[in-house]
Image (tube, helix red, strand yellow):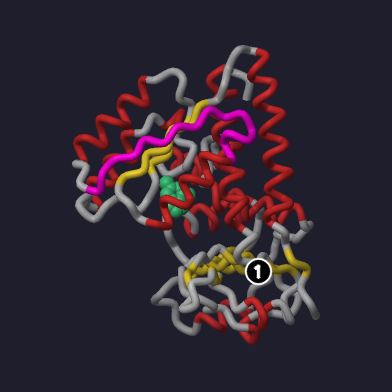
């Protein structure tokens, strides 16, 4: 079998067109959705991500601004920036790019994310947003899991009653991903670095979401023939090229659907950030 490749770039264009339509509707009410991205330090990957987010936001008519702060910024100063953005009515969405610099402790990072007004939490990482997801209430859902769900939906991958394996238990991808699959009535297993016989767990799955950050971890003989495999990994190979968590050449011979890296989940993550920003603006107006 040769997998159908899930084209994240094409699907992200569709999502951006939907966002554009909402932005046009908001303009009729005199609202321009605003996104503030806070980038502390000089992590090279973060610089690229943030540049892409701002570029794509501008394309759909979102007013995006990037607040750049030095790597030595204090947690107090970062909190001050978040509080200023909370109070700014031209800002509908706030995103604090992760990872924060090494000088900010995990506890401080958590305090900073908690300080974001949940109504502006377009990253879906505030405990209130995560709690809403657990409770099945409307809130903001993290962008990467939202993008993965849209990819599965767009390709008509059945989820109800099927076995889904999520590899990775991060707050940003693995945990919200598992909750979304569960909400779609899949039978969900979350695997991680301590999982015994990971290959055997993956072999049982009709849907595999790989989000661990280990280059080409998922091999062809781990995958059930016909399974849908979504590769969230973005790893830099020895040759400097981007590789996912899935061994593309092997798995594409076995899977029914497969998302590539690059050109898979990455563009969808950004598209769903824009979706969330337009949703935040619409909600403030009372229209969504
Ligand atoms: N770093 C890598 N991906 C993300 C993301 O989706 N949101 C934030 N805030 N930081 C990230």
Residue 41 placement, left or right of 192: left
- Image quarter where the C terminus lies is top right
Q: Does 132 lie within the magenta span?
A: no
Circle 1 packing at 10 Å, graded few (<14), some (14-19), many (20+), is many
**Mark 1 CB near ligand 1 (8 Å cut):** no
Residue 74, compared with residue 176, is above or below; it is above
Looking at the image, which is closer to me, 51 or 227?
Answer: 51
Looking at the image, which is closer to me, 233 or 119?
Answer: 233
Q: Position of residue 23 (x, y in %)?
A: 65, 26
Q: Residue at x 54, y 33 (%)?
A: 277
Residue 213, compared with residue 200, is above or below; it is above
Q: Residue furthest bottom?
A: 221
Magenta residues, start to end: 56-71
Hey, which quadrant is residue 204 in on the image?
A: bottom right
- Image quarter where the N terminus lies is bottom right
Q: Residue at x 69, y 20 (%)?
A: 25
Hey, which quadrant is residue 202 in on the image?
A: bottom right
Residue 257 placement, left or right of 263: right
Q: Residue at x 39, y 76 (%)?
A: 194
Q: Residue at x 60, y 79 (%)?
A: 247
Q: SS for tag 1?
A: strand
Q: Position of residue 182 (x, y in %)?
A: 59, 55
Looking at the image, which is closer to me, 128 or 46?
Answer: 46
Q: Position of residue 9 (x, y in %)?
A: 68, 53
Residue 225, compared with residue 127, is above or below; it is below
Residue underneath mark 1: 229
Give the total number of marks visible in the rendering: 1
């Amino acid at each position: 079998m040769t997998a159908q490749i899930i084209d994240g770039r094409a699907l992200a264009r569709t999502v951006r067109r939907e966002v554009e339509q909402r932005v046009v509707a908001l303009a009729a009410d005199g609202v321009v959705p605003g996104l503030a991205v806070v980038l502390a330090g000089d992590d090279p990957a973060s610089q690229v991500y943030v540049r892409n987010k701002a570029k794509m936001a501008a394309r759909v008519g979102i007013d995006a601004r990037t607040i750049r702060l030095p790597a030595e910024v204090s947690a107090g100063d970062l909190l001050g920036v978040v509080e200023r953005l909370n109070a700014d009515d031209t800002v509908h969405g706030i995103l604090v790019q992760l990872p924060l610099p090494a000088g900010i402790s995990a506890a401080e990072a958590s305090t900073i994310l908690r300080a974001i007004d949940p109504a502006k939490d377009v990253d879906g990482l505030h405990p209130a947003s995560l709690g809403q997801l657990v409770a099945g209430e409307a809130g903001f859902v993290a962008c990467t899991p939202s993008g993965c769900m849209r990819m599965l939906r767009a390709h008509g991958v059945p989820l109800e009653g099927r076995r889904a394996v999520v590899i990775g238990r991060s707050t940003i991808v693995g945990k919200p991903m598992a909750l979304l699959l569960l909400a779609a009535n899949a039978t969900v297993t979350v695997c991680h670095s301590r999982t015994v016989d990971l290959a055997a767990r993956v072999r049982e799955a009709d849907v595999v979401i790989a989000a661990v950050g280990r280059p080409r971890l998922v091999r062809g003989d781990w995958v059930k023939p016909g399974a849908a495999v979504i590769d969230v990994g973005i790893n830099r190979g020895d040759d400097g090229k981007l590789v996912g968590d899935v061994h593309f050449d092997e798995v594409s011979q076995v899977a029914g659907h497969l998302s590539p890296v690059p050109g898979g989940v990455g563009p969808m993550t950004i598209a769903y950030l824009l979706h969330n920003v337009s949703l935040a603006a619409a909600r403030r107006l009372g229209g969504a």
